[in-house]
Image: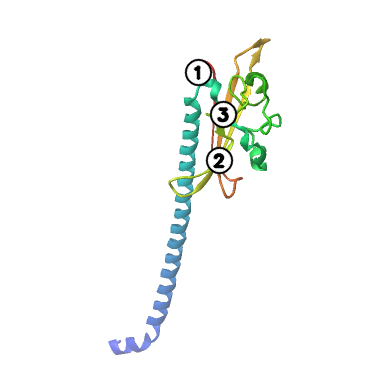
């Protein structure tokens, strides 16, 4: 068989090969584009979780730096708390945020929110942290920081211990507050702070 005969028999074969090759390359490029998009989404989410964790640690370090008696929440935000805040596991129905008690915090705070320093002042503690605040982080994303302080006095075998303050920091998406990025919790007592 001569070269001329072979070329005549292969008419149109190059076009079919070309179409198959373009289809295969298109599918491969589409797969790469999807993988790139998914990795970008994953990196963004991971970055937001890392930023939220850093914000939670920063907020917690602020509490750890305060004297035990000064660890409290600013109750001026009590009227604006939403359902997301009130349905969190760190919040209990015995919390009285809008109208803090004027009795000793260790008594008023038992099974509730510590709203004051050792003796509740008539004005709010200047070192108190807002219950809820929204900040813009360096990644230009807005985060909502919810703070909870729960006090309780442990008892065992009829003995009463020192009051403990359990601090919970929850970092949420400010636009979708039901989406939680980070949660950090610690318990402090007078001896460790």
> Between marks 2 and 1, how big is the CA–CA gap?
27 Å
Can see residue 45? yes
Query: Who is closer to the viewer here, 7 or 139?
Result: 139
Front-lying residue, 4 or 32: 32
Q: Quickly name the residue at label 2.
A: 133
Compare marks 3 and 2 and give the one earlier in the sequence: 2
* Mark-to-mark CA distance, 3 and 2: 16 Å
Q: Quadrant of the N terminus?
A: bottom left
Helix, strand, or loop for circle 3?
strand
Q: Residue at x 66, y 42 (%)?
A: 82
| x and y, in percent, of residue 8 in the image | 35, 89
CB of mark 3 within 8 Å of CB of mark 2? no
Residue that label 1 marks: 192
**Left/right of residue 130 with respect to residue 18 in the rendered view:** right
- Which image quadrant for residue 118? top right
Which x, y percent locates residue 119?
Answer: 61, 19
Residue linked to disc 3? 167
- Determine the CA span between mark 1 and mark 3: 14 Å
Is residue 86 shown left or right of residue 66? right
Is residue 157 visible in the rendered image? The answer is no
Q: Secondary structure at mark 2?
A: strand
Q: Secondary structure at mark 1?
A: loop
Q: Earlier in the sequence, mark 1 or mark 3?
A: 3
Which one is closest to the eye, mark 2 or mark 1?
2
Q: Position of residue 109 (x, y in %)?
A: 65, 23
**Position of residue 147 measured from the top left corner of the image (x, y, whole percent):** 57, 34
- Residue drawn at (67%, 20%), measured in percent from left and top? 103
């Amino acid at each position: 068989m001569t070269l001329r005969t072979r070329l005549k028999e292969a008419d149109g074969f190059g076009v079919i090969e070309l179409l198959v090759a373009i289809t295969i390359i298109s599918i491969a490029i589409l797969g790469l584009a999807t993988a790139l998009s998914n990795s970008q989404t994953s990196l963004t989410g991971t970055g937001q979780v890392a930023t939220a964790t850093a914000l939670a640690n920063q907020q917690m370090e602020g509490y750890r730096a305060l004297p035990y008696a000064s660890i409290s929440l600013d109750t001026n935000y009590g009227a604006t708390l939403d359902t997301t805040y009130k349905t969190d596991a760190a919040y209990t129905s015995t919390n009285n945020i809008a109208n803090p008690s004027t009795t000793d915090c260790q008594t008023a705070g038992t099974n509730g929110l510590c709203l004051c320093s050792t003796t509740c002042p008539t004005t709010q503690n200047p070192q108190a942290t807002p219950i809820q605040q929204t900040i813009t982080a360096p990644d230009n994303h807005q985060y909502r920081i919810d703070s909870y302080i729960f006090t309780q006095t442990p008892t065992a075998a009829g003995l009463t211990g020192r009051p403990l303050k359990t601090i919970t920091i929850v970092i949420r998406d400010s636009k979708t507050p039901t989406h939680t990025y980070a949660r950090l919790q610690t318990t402090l007592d007078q001896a460790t702070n």
